[in-house]
């Protein structure tokens, strides 16, 4: 399965959840599939999981 196909399959399952993505093609693909103010796009590659964990703990 290609990345875009995977994103397309999971996008309808998101409601008001915050979604954290990294820099790169996935950012643009996710924004095209699910334009939402809860999309948080990081400008680096190495801190996405750490930032997502921090947000999940701070905003349960």
Image (cartoon, grey):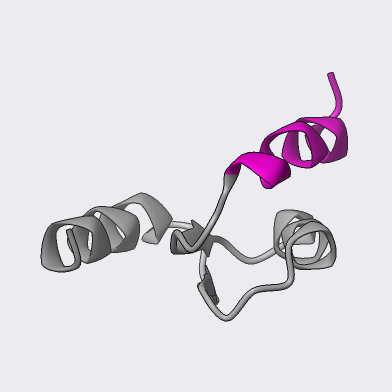
Foreground pick, 18 / 3? 18
Q: Which residues are magenta?
A: 1-13
Which of the 4 quarters of the picture holds residue 7? top right
Q: Quadrant of the N terminus?
A: top right
* Secondary structure that dominates the magenta span: helix
Query: Is residue 7 within the magenta segment?
Result: yes
Report the residue at 44% width, 64% height from top: 18
Residue 34's place in the image compared with 36, above or below, is above
Residue at 70% x, 63% y is 27
The x, y position of residue 43, in whole percent, is: 55, 76
* Residue 49 vertical position relative to residue 59 in the rendered view, above or below: above
Q: Is residue 11 magenta?
A: yes
Check the picture and name the quadrant holding the C terminus: bottom left
The one nearer the camera, 40 or 49, is 40
Q: Is residue 23 above or below residue 7?
A: below
Q: How many marks?
A: 0
In x, y percent, where is residue 9? 77, 32
């Amino acid at each position: 399965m290609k990345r875009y196909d995977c994103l397309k399959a999971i996008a309808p399952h998101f409601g008001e959840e915050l979604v954290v993505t990294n820099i790169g093609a996935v950012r643009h693909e996710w924004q095209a599939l699910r334009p939402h103010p809860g999309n948080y796009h990081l400008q680096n590659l190495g801190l996405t999981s750490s930032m997502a964990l921090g947000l999940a703990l701070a905003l349960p």
